[in-house]
Amino acid sequence: MLRKYGQVLALLALGVAELVTLVSAFLCLLGTFGLGMVFLLPPQVRMVRWVTGTARRLAGGAADMVIEPPYLPEPPPPQPQADGLYRSHRTLYKTPRLPAWNDRWKWMVTDPATWRDMLWLLLDPVVKAALLPLLVLLPGRGLRLYAAWCELLLAATPASRMAGRLARLNRARNLAVDTQAVEMRRIERDLHDGTQARLVALGMTIGAAEQLMDSDLAAARTLMAKAKEASAETLTELRRLIRGVHPPVLAERGLGDAVRALAMDSPLRVSVEVDLPHRPEAPVEAAAYFAVSELLANAARHGGAESVRIDISGDGPNLRVLVVDDGWGGADPSKGSGLNGIERRLAAFDGVVAIDSPPGGPTTVALELPRVLPEYWAGDIVKLPRWKTATVVFLWSTSWLPLFPQGIVAGAAKALGSQERSWFLALYLPQPWQWPCVAFMILLGTVMYVVAATLPALHNREAYMCQNVPRHVLFP
């Protein structure tokens, strides 16, 4: 009880900050839209969101619930064009400062949650005053009512959740496109600088050998031997390039054997443990394979490691890859493009990368790709609650009764003029009510079948949507 009263006092104390924020918000809106001082809005919106965020935490904690923030995702930082300038609508800037400010201002103004926060800030003192007697006499019930009020205006809406998912999908698509473009440029560079140059040199060597064929046969044979060596080197380089695009062992043997082959070619002592009953799809295997390849290369070149442990396993429908090396640690994604490239590659599958690399080591990198493994062998299958199971069983076992004997068969008997009433309910009713009763029975049986088939599907959809909440932190 004392804890409940403490939460009530905290909410009432927050009301003082709300009043100050409300007054400043009114003055800020007046200055922004009345006097054109648009620079006042962003700090005021941040202040309002701090107050509403505090209210979400206090009200949700008091009612043992979580009130999710409803804000749209922040706009990504501006990206330079090919000429190095930054575009904001039809204006070009030399630095990203103004485009970033414009995008952020537009994001705050056009987000419906901004104005819902303002409305909550205006009405919350009245709600608190109305609930004050209940908060004093029955604090538990009063806090639950207040949390319901906060959830009404401050919680995430289906539109905001959908906008967040669309923003994540757009970012993943852009990252996938950028990653593909980088890979294409790398392949073109390798072909142009390596294989193409070797083929040109091979052609020149063969041409010189042809010219010496009649005058100096020994020199021609020497050049042909060099051409043979050059062709073998070119073939080796082409095979290496093909392995860089998509290793044949990955396509033929799967992720586990491909990583084992990668470990055999590594100069480090690498141990590989694989626990995958079935293979993921080919794009997923390629993303995980190249991520492991990049981590092995980082451990050998930059980490000073001597041994690496790789663990590939399935966590239900999720694919998890754990790479641990005994290097000197200090890995930082902001200081290199390798880890950023892994994040971009996995982002196409909504994957996450968690890094734990204290100075002195060891370095632990965990990769997780959610919902990429076949569901039929996943360990944690979401089951129907008992009441839903009982409802589905009841509907499937009884829906035939109104649909067929009491509906279709009774209607056929009436249409044929049969005098045998048997146990057909409709034929015992007065003449005007017989056809409506037949139609009702057919409709009732159909609805029962539809509900019996739809209830498990809706439950599976809800379970799938629940998997979209932020996943647990892999490293505390």
Image (cartoon, rainbow, N blue to C red):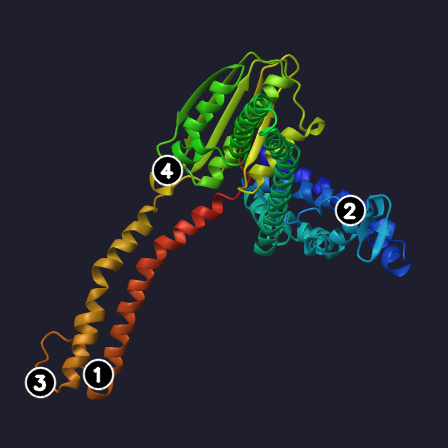
SS for dot 2: loop
Give above or below for 279 relative to 386.
above
Mark nearer the N terminus (3 vs 4): 4
Residue 15, position in %: x, y? 73, 44
Instruction: State how far apart marks 2 and 4 are (Cα).
Output: 46 Å
Residue at the spot 29% in from the left edge and 55% down from the top edge: 391
Mark 1 is surrounded, within 10 Å at the Cα level, by few (under 14), some (14 to 19) or many (20 or more) other residues, namely some
SS for dot 1: helix
Residue 442, located in which quarter of the rendered image? bottom left
Instruction: State how far apart marks 3 and 2 are (Cα).
Output: 87 Å
Mark nearer the N terminus (4 vs 1): 4
Viewer-closest of 234 and 363: 234
Residue at the spot 10% in from the left edge and 80% down from the top edge: 421
Q: Amino acid at mark 4?
A: Ala
Viewer-closest of 300 and 223: 223
In the rendered image, the quadrant that contains the C terminus is top right
Q: Amino acid at mark 3?
A: Gln
Residue 124, position in %: x, y? 69, 51
Instruction: State how far apart marks 1 and 2 are (Cα).
Output: 77 Å
Mark nearer the N terminus (3 vs 1): 3
Q: Name the residue carrying label 2.
A: 82
Q: Amino acid at mark 2?
A: Ala
Q: Name the residue carrying label 4.
A: 378
Side of 182 relative to 237 (left or right): right
Give above or below for 413 relative to 340.
below
Q: Name the residue carrying label 1.
A: 434
Can residue 447 be seen?
Answer: yes
Residue at the spot 48% in from the left edge and 43% down from the top edge: 467
Q: Name the residue carrying label 3.
A: 419
Mark nearer the N terminus (3 vs 2): 2
